[in-house]
Image (cartoon, rainbow, N blue to C red):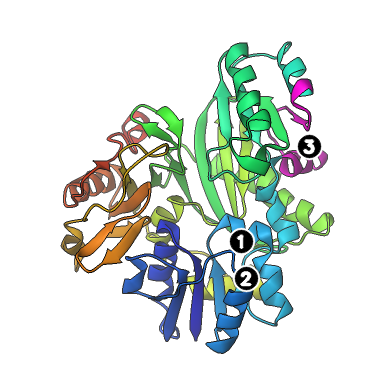
Amino acid sequence: MKVLIVGSGGREHALAWKTAQNPEVEKIYCAPGNAGIGEYAECVDIGAMEFEKLVAFAKEKEIGLTIVGMDDPLVGGIVDAFEKEGLRVFGPRANAAILEGSKAFSKDLMKKYHIPTAAYENFDDPQAALAYLETAKFPIVLKADGLALGKGVLICNTLEEAKEGVKSIMMDKKFGASGNRMVIEEFMTGREVSVLSFVDGKTVRTMTSAQDHKRAGDGDTGLNTGGMGTFSPSPFYTKEIDEFCQSHIYQPTVDAMAAEGREFKGVIFFGLMLTEDGPKVLEYNARFGDPEAQVVLTRMKTDLVKVCEACIDGTLDQMELEFEDNAAVCVVLASDGYPVKYEKGFLINGLEKFQDKDGYYVFHAGSRKTPEGIVTNGGRVLGVTATGADLKEARANAYEAVEWIEFGNKYYRHDIGKAIEEAQ
């Protein structure tokens, strides 16, 4: 079988690494890919949003399965384009990817089907939003309705901050058309947990839990990013919490989408807040998280290709997911200045130290191959990932491996998984 992976980040590198473990996969392509993905796949110079070219390529190369990693093409309808041509593709159609594509839609869905989430209001008019804030309780959360690379969420502690946030999102259009609508919701407190799941339209099979670190700086300071690191499993995600979520969040979400005529096949990422009143949904994503995929897939024993095919065929109820009884930690090496302004093109040294080292991985996010070697080519450059018998060992291993890599403006958080010590 030939497999095509669509995307270019650390998530797609992890997907390629996992796909390569299937003995029936003879060839992997990745469009557009990056320097690290080239170890497992042939990178193809086609953009993730160039649907016609991707479809033509899949037909020409007789691709047996396409796995879409990124949110933009899913929300844009890549699955619909592939299915129209009779091609097998893993991911939700556009009418189901709206679960991530519109925060207003997902909030309304949760309200209609009584899925626990924060209280909220949707706004199309910035003046109405400003008027609402005059009587609101602070802190409060502002969310651009559409996709914003994980950065379209503002936590505002004062009325002045919130007014500036409305101006930034809805008037100045900091996130483009994603800010045409905005969700204002109550600020929830508690532990954040991410739970990824495979879905075949009716059955949901959850993967192991994880926890992301969104803020750029140590101690959860600085701007929101696409994710500066993650660990798995979360020590705060107990058996009791899992049972509650299976009954009141996971299956109800899948059933709600089916009831709305939006059958969901692919991955639903459940972003949860473990509040004093029980688990509530912070957000949905319609694909693997990045960098959550790096820690979840390195612990997954079940064959990825077989699970993807079961989701497409509607036979997920016949599969059980298995994960290693261990832990994983991913520390993102970024370009100093990310997520605002940063330089690219620095030579990366030390990548060879990961070869033949069991339990140590380096997943490329923003890298490029040049005649001089592999150079930095983005804000998030690498995801240094390590496993261990438990979270403490995995964290020590990951930070050990961080020291193996050097490049000009290397930057990373020093406290990824620090909550682990607090839980023990």
Measure the C-alpha gap from mark 3 to mark 1. 27 Å
Return the disc, 3 or 2, that comes first in the chain's sequence: 2
Which residue has dot 3 on it?
111
Do the residues under discs 1 and 2 have CB atoms within 8 angstroms? yes
**Location of residue 200 with respect to 185 vertically, above or below:** below
Q: Nearer the viewer, residue 214 or 263?
A: 214
Whether residue 358 is visible here, answered yes or no, is no
Residue occupying the point 21% across, 55% down: 347
Disc 2 element: helix
Left or right: 12 as drawn, with respect to 131: left
- Residue type highlighted by circle 3: Lys
Labelled disc at residue 51: 2
Whether residue 191 is visible here, answered yes or no, is yes
Residue occupying the point 44% across, 58% down: 11
| Circle 3 residues within 10 Å: few <14, some 14–19, many ≥20 | some
Which residue has dot 1 on it?
73
Left or right: 93 as drawn, with respect to 198: right
**Location of residue 236 with respect to 306 vertically, above or below:** above
Measure the C-alpha gap from mark 3 to mark 2. 34 Å
| Image quarter of the C terminus | top left
Residue occupying the point 70% across, 81% down: 85
- Residue type highlighted by circle 1: Pro
Q: Percent from the top left, x then y, of residue 256? A: 78, 51
Measure the C-alpha gap from mark 1 to mark 2. 8 Å
Region in magenta: 104-127
